[in-house]
Image (tube, rainbow, N blue to C red):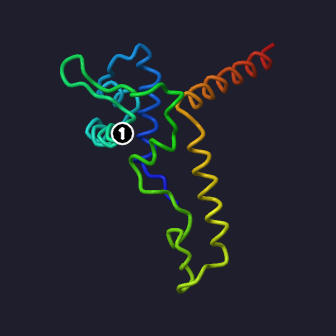
Amino acid sequence: MNLTTKGKYAVTASLDLAIHNKDSSYVAISSIAARQSIPAPYLEQLFRFLRKAGILDSLRGPSGGYRLRRPSSEIKIGEIIAAVEKRMDATQCGGVGDCNGGSTCLAHNLWMELNSEVDYFLMNISLEDVIKNKTRNKDRNLDKLLIASG
């Protein structure tokens, strides 16, 4: 199982878009790249995949850029990762079951179950969920600071 920089950057950039295009305006890729410290040419490549997957819209020109095609509550993290990555797989056999010299290895079902759990988790958390969770964590940290200083 491997989550590469592609998947991490695609999720981070999509979260940035969800935060910065509340009025459905287009956001310049250079703005996202600067805020997230991601090379703009690399983001451009990733955004092509996200556009093809129906996650982003784009507009050329001086007021152009990118925006989410759907509300952030409807875009799942698993969709974003699937658009830019190969399928994540914890098995050595790609799920075929021939990992032990043509037969199923002892841990095959364990790794298949892990694949299912990861897929389920990623397909059941939206961009909005991640953003709200970050806000909740900030609120919890602030509460801790207030209690500690109080």
Give the percent coordinates (x, y) of residue 146: 75, 15
Location of residue 143 by image quarter = top right
Q: Count neighbours of disc 1 (C-alpha within 10 A) and say few if under 14, some if 14 to 19, many if 20 or more.
A: many
In the picture as drawn, the residue positioned furthest to the bottom comes out as 101
Give the percent coordinates (x, y) of residue 61: 18, 21
Residue at image position (66%, 69%) is 109
Who is closer to the viewer here, 5 or 129?
129
Residue at image position (42%, 48%) is 5
Residue at image position (51%, 40%) is 77
Which residue type carries mark 1? Answer: Leu
In the rendered image, the vertical position of residue 81 relative to residue 66, given as above or below: below
Who is closer to the viewer here, 14 or 57?
57
Give the percent coordinates (x, y) of residue 96: 52, 73
Give the percent coordinates (x, y) of residue 59: 24, 24
Residue designated by label 1: 50
Q: Quadrant of the C terminus?
A: top right
